[in-house]
Image: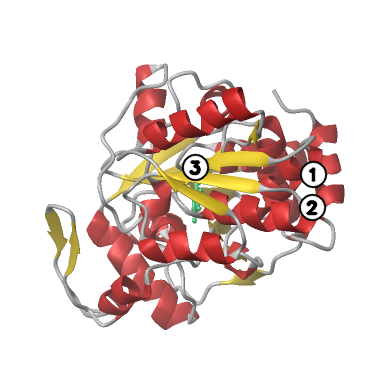
Amino acid sequence: MLVEADVERAAEVLRGRADRTPLVPSLYAGADLWLKLEICQPIGAFKLRGALNAVAAAAGDVVCCSTGNHGRGVAWAAREAGKRAVICMSELVPEAKVAGIRALGAEVRIKGRSQDEAQAEADRLTREEGLTGISPFDDSLVIAGQATIGAEIMAERPGIETLLVPLSGGGLAAGVAFAAKRAKPSVRVVGVSMDRGAAMHESLLAGAPVQVEEVASLADSLGGGIGMENRMSFAMCRDLLDDTVLVTEEEIYRAMQETYYTDRLVAEGGSVVGLAALMAGKVRCDGPVATILTGRNVDMTQFTRVVTGQDVTLGEMTVKGVPHGA
Ligand SMILES: *Cc1c(COP(=O)(O)O)cnc(C)c1O
């Protein structure tokens, strides 16, 4: 389990490098909604926080497994620290994300068709070549880094009553819930995932980590398992989250449009699931609500199709096109 000093130390490491993104009011009319703009981070996603904190503490070179944003974060942090970074990822990761990581100077290894297979390769490099493995979500330094987001939100807007947090491996939700509830015990923290392949949601229902099938989604950053040997993020999400909610691909599609046309912001599908849940009436929103726009590293061809109301094909399924506001 985390202690408060871990979050304070992480905030020190991040100071001047990844701290204090803006918390802005959304123009969305359906709720008193605040947006924490982690899309403004140097790598375009919040994962820089956990990565900077973990890479700073690593003795030597680092390796990780990532659907993209964690890999970018580790690559950026390693370059800053003068360390070598090897990033392992599955074949399902969009090409734009792979190219982005190579551009940051990291070595990319493509391995298998799931996050778990890519993780096995990262584990092998840790064992056989002595690199320090950095989990995208199941690591106390990473969770402490992500926790600084919760601390910043509650310090800036203590009136927030509900936090809607995009949920995949649960490092973000665990950290944010931990820090936010330290600041304000009554704050409700709700994890939001897409309804196909929601590993943490299924695991929480089962009472233990379960494997889910990974499928293409507008929220590709939320794909992947939580690890059958999960050490921290599962227990923290179980103990700290008030609820988990699932949203459909159609709801994510509409929330991406809403974020773009109403707030004029470019955000990944995985970023807007909190808004999607609000728009679908799937979460209660009596008081002020905050959500985290977690990343903006979206495939621009897909993004353009969404905001112009065209059909989007995701593996076997098609999300029917619909213009904004229709
Ligand atoms: C990683 C990621 C998440 C989910 O974070 P977890 O700690 O894995 O739950 C949400 N949004 C984006 C954009 C991400 O990259």
- In the rendering, at what x and y percent does residue 64 appear? 56, 40
Residue 308 seen anywhere in this rendered image of the structure: yes
Q: CA distance from mark 3 to mark 2?
A: 34 Å
Instruction: Name the amino acid, label 3.
Output: Val
Q: Where is mark 2, residue-wise? A: 81
Q: Are marks 1 and 3 in contact (CB under 8 Å)?
A: no
Q: Where is mark 3, residue-wise? A: 190
- In the rendering, at what x and y percent does residue 19 appear? 76, 59
At mark 3, the secondary structure is strand
Q: Looking at the image, is 22 positioned above or below residue 146?
A: below
Label located before the other in sequence (3 or 2): 2
Tag shown at residue 83: none
Q: Please, which residue is most extreme toward the front here? A: 129
Instruction: Name the amino acid, label 2.
Output: Ala
Between label 3 and label 2, give the one nearer the viewer. 2
Q: Where is mark 1, residue-wise? A: 56
Instruction: Name the amino acid, label 1.
Output: Ala
Q: Residues within 10 Å of mark 3 (few under 14, many from 20)?
A: many
Q: Looking at the image, is 275 positioned above or below residue 240?
A: below
Between label 1 and label 3, give the one nearer the viewer. 1
Q: Are marks 2 and 1 in contact (CB under 8 Å)?
A: yes
At mark 2, the secondary structure is helix
Q: CA distance from mark 2 to mark 1?
A: 7 Å
Q: Residues within 10 Å of mark 1 (few under 14, many from 20)?
A: some
